[in-house]
Amino acid sequence: MAKSLFYISPSLEDKNYGGSVVAKSNLEALSRVLQSYSTTVLSVNRNASSDCVKVPTTHNKVGTALANLCLLCATLSPKGAYFLISRIRKEQPELIWLDSSLFGILIPLIRFLSRRSKIICYFHNIETPIIKHYAKRQPSYWISYLATAANEYLSIKGSDLLIAIQQTDEAILKRRNSSALTCCIPVSIKDGFRNIQVQLAPRHVDIPYALFVGSDFPPNVEALAYLNFKIAPRLNNKRIIAIGNGIDKYAHQFKNLDVRGRVDDIADFYTQAQIVVAPIFSGGGMKVKIAEALMFNKMVLASNFAAVGYEDVPNSVLIRTDDDETFLNTIQNCDSNTDSKAREYYLRLFSPYAIQQRIEQAISRIE
């Protein structure tokens, strides 16, 4: 009888954003590593992909707050928790991949009901300090913070293997559980590069531009404000285009930028951009859009914070700075004809095939 894998994720939906892109890439790599396993993919998401088993979720913010009081996170409802535990008890999977640290509340029950199951917890972020930061600004987040802290604690203490996406996060996990097995596997994204000629793609703006990519998320909005007020007004004959789900509602607020919101084909925007910018100063984990820019063979200009996890990418490809003047001058003086080696680093470090061996080595430590 074939061994079985349960892949449980809050990020598997049809839309592509940082977490969903990484979740899909990890699943693809796992499927290649564990070809002999029977895989059940469970999505804890209100808009779950059609090819996943949909786990019952909360329906609105009130439902999520009530679930938080039960120490349930990531829109997982009490009914959804019962659904997951029942499936695990019935099928007794050899391996459970928790694609978030926010399902830790399930681990003690899994240990009791499915003793042979090995549990891997993949940390997209260290969530607790991020939620605490928001809670200090908005008191309604404190309920979420308590639930997040409890789940993350149980994930760190109860999993057989903890996977961080960058070395700083791995060190934090080690400090919080010195006896835990840990490893570092960076983000990866599926290869969506098309070798198209710039002149064949429709022009998006009549002057050279830098590109910012990011959805409606507080650190991305902070980045838009930085670009709008400190950088864009001083550019000469260049523009900054911003694309991403939901950010078009900020177009009236950031009039020095060309804010487009969601676009049908980001490949064209990447192809024509002279450089990709990522002035991110808060949040956690790794910035997936940097890996995406490398995939499209684009040079990246990023803050030091945004570049965490990309230490193996040289400064000739990923320019790191927190200095406003350097940021401005780099955009102003960049040339789209520069022979970038960016894609070589994507293929070697951040493609699904690049992380496949790391995942295989990680799993071998607990089998």
Image: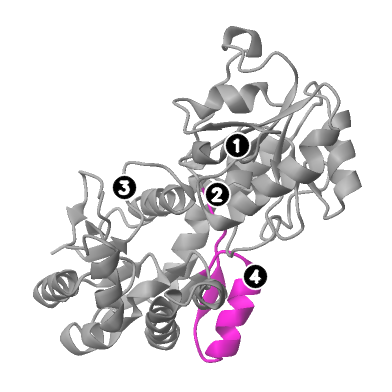
Q: Nearer the observer, disc 2 or disc 4?
A: 4
Find out whether the residues at labels 2 and 4 contact each other: C-beta distance under 8 Å.
Answer: no
Q: Residues within 10 Å of mark 2 (few under 14, many from 20)?
A: some
Q: Magenta region: which residues? A: 164-188
Image coordinates for residue 189, horizontal then vertical, percent: 50, 45
Q: Residue furthest top?
A: 200
Residue at numbered disc 4: 167
Q: Nearer the observer, disc 1 or disc 2?
A: 1
Out of 237 and 287, give the one closest to the viewer: 237
Q: Earlier in the sequence, mark 2 or mark 3?
A: 3
Out of 60 and 204, give the one closest to the viewer: 60
Judge from the rendering whether residue 218 lies leftward or rightward of residue 262; answer left or right.
right
Amino acid type for the residue under numbered disc 3: Glu
Find out whether the residues at labels 4 and 3 contact each other: C-beta distance under 8 Å.
Answer: no
Q: Nearer the observer, disc 3 or disc 1?
A: 3
- Say which residue appears at 24% left-offset and 72% top-offset: 94
Amino acid type for the residue under numbered disc 2: Ala
Q: Earlier in the sequence, mark 4 or mark 3?
A: 3
Q: Earlier in the sequence, mark 1 or mark 2?
A: 1
Out of 143 and 167, give the one closest to the viewer: 143
Q: Earlier in the sequence, mark 3 or mark 1?
A: 3
| Real-space Cα separation, disc 4 to disc 3, in angstroms | 28 Å
